[in-house]
Amino acid sequence: GHNRLYIVRSGWVSISKSLPDGRLITLALLGPNSVFLQEDGGRRGHAGSLAETLVDASIVEAKLEAAGELLADSPQLAAAMISGLNRRITFLHGLVDQVLRRDTTLRLASTLLTLANAVGEPAGDGFVRLAVPLTHHTLANMIGSNRVTVTRKLRELQDQQLVGSAGRNSLLIHPVRLQAFVDAADQ
């Protein structure tokens, strides 16, 4: 297969991969000035990653061959690309760690924190409202779990006042409390 290079100019994009059992797992949430490759599923049975916009996004496609020229012309883009790759590596290290520990609650909490930073809008009392509608099924796909488990885990986080509901498919997140929860679990 061949690769295509994309630059996120504005908005947010979710990059996920299909697991052998059919579930999806989110590999990255990319914001403005992030760069990603989309590979065509070259090897049989090894489909590439799936890129989906979370909010209205402006995405520019660039030929991979032209990337060197593009980066040479724009030091800001080169710096943003390196920074973005570093964030993705950090995110993937965290994901591997969470998957190895198989702690769904922590995977969910970390994903909610990432979403709160990406698309959170202040909602008062330290909470932010996620600016994208998220079903429990979508969240389950993001963390490689199932809807029933996510519903149960969200209820547990709600009981601890770390998250809340703002109506149908609209979540409230308390980033400070949720981060403290994740940090305590990592000790």
Image (cartoon, helix red, strand yellow):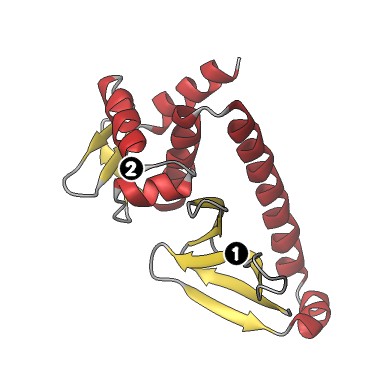
Q: Residue at x 73, y 79 (%)?
A: 1
Task: Identify the mark at residue 17; answer none if there is no mark.
Answer: none
Q: Which residue is mark 1?
A: 49
Label 1, residues with CA under 10 Å away: few <14, some 14-19, many ≥20: many
Q: Which residue is mark 2?
A: 147
Label 2, residues with CA under 10 Å away: few <14, some 14-19, many ≥20: some
Image-quadrant location for residue 36? bottom right
Element carrying mark 1: loop
**Residue 115 or 105: which is nearer the viewer?**
105
Image-quadrant location for residue 146? top left
Residue 63 position (above or below residue 159): below
Q: Earlier in the sequence, mark 2 or mark 1?
A: 1
Image-quadrant location for residue 4? bottom right
Disc 1 marks a residue whose amino acid type is Ser
Disc 2 marks a residue whose amino acid type is Arg
| Residue extending farthest left | 167
Left or right of 79 on screen, residue 134: left
Element carrying mark 2: helix
Left or right of 110 on screen, residue 155: left
The x and y percentages for residue 95 are 61, 39
Q: Residue at x 75, y 75 (%)?
A: 74
Residue 119 position (above or below residue 176): below
Q: Residue at x 41, y 62 (%)?
A: 54
Q: Residue at x 50, y 35 (%)?
A: 107
